[in-house]
Image (cartoon, helix red, strand yellow):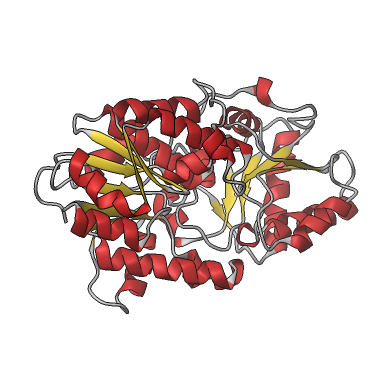
Amino acid sequence: MMDNPIPGRLLDLSRLVSRAGRVLTGIDRVELAYLKAAVADKVPAWGLVRTPIGFLLLDARGMQGLADRSEGREPWGAASRLARVFGKLDGMQQRALSDMRRLATARTHKGGLARLLRRHLPTGFAYLNVGQSNLTDRVLHSVRHGAEGRIAVMIHDTIPLDHPLYQTPAAVERFRQMLKRVRAYADLVIYNSRATRGDAERHMEGWGAVPHGVVAHLGVDLAAPAPEDLPAGLPPDGAYFVTVGTIEPRKNHALLIEIWERLAKQTTPQEMPRLVICGARGWMNEEVFFRMDRSPLMGKHLHEAAGLSDGAVAALLEGAAGGLYPSFAEGYGLPAIEAAARGVPVICADLPATREILGDIPVYASPKDSYLWQRRIMALAKGRQAGRQADAEAFEPPRWTQHFNKVFSLT
């Protein structure tokens, strides 16, 4: 626990920079929220960005420049000649790193991080890493032992260890080693839910003393609906449902596709609802991709929509009969929380983190019981087709102000 006043904060922004030009997912959005809060706070703030050859240090002006580019207020600049040397980086990553070099107040090679931090940051600064990126021995040792900084890390879930079938063996081992480093180095671990804290501390207890932890529910910022951002054909006609999330095995899109294939045989065209799948294709899910690519329902009753803006997703949710979230595991479940915050009826799996945040607001159903899901989906669809909107219980989501009041009092 960080008991003394913090003279400065160093926020790791490596993940956010690596995501330049892409639609930000859950953890990316958390890092962006921290970036904006750190710049706005009275405690001096800096940003750390890993590059292929070392590290960049951003001051508050450089951090604001990154926020402006991440949120589309400023365009990314051209890639420098140096950035183009790194062939493993795509064009947007080259442009982002070039901009960060132009905005940086200092830079160093890989072995010079401790010296850079001692030169530019006050003794006792807090290093915050909420993106679970760049959590290497080099960085953590440089902060703790090389620059006398204190370390706070956010853990979003322990899914790789608790549900290894949804990850590659290499990814599981990388996560295990990362969590071991967090246990060894962190002064404070920030958890998005009590469920995540329980899971993470259960694993860390097997390796030694567990760092001090704090639970701070993530804030929910509801984007204004932007129907003008939707592609042609969306929203679909008639009653439709929305599911939001990367198309990966853990999210259980297979259950929804199974239901829609069955409905196509059991209902009339007039009764048949639509499903909009909002999310990019992920990993280890070739069977689902094959079914989607070969299904005669695609484009008619199933719609795949990747890369939508937050405003476009908000516009879809505003007119949806319901949001569907049959995940096998979640650390927080932000899409379901956002849907409930908009007053959209939610059907989801009964997971500890979801129950912790949403309580009895959703309709819960086992992610293995497709017939129960089908019955509940059709009940909502028939109500919408009859001109009735399901009465969703009022829900006030967690706010970032509450989150940062708690976290910044400790870091």
Residue located farthest toward the bottom when viewing the structure as drawn: 206
Frontmost residue, 58 versus 155: 58
Q: Position of residue 50 (x, y in %)?
A: 41, 47
At a point 65% along the width and 57% down the height, the residue shown is 248
Please indicate whether residue 268 sits to the left or right of residue 217 in the image.
right
Frontmost residue, 378 versus 396: 396
- Give the quarter of the image for residue 309: top right
Give the quadrant of the N terminus.
Answer: bottom left
Reply above or below: 183 against 50: below
Q: Position of residue 262 (x, y in %)?
A: 83, 57
Reply above or below: 2 against 366: above
Query: In this rendering, does residue 276 appear at all?
Result: yes
Frontmost residue, 2 versus 125: 125
At a point 68% along the width and 60% down the height, the residue shown is 372
Q: Position of residue 31 (x, y in %)?
A: 41, 42
Reply above or below: 208 against 287: below
Query: In this rendering, does residue 222 appear at all?
Result: no
Reply above or below: 73 against 374: above
At a point 48% along the width and 49% down the height, the residue shown is 52
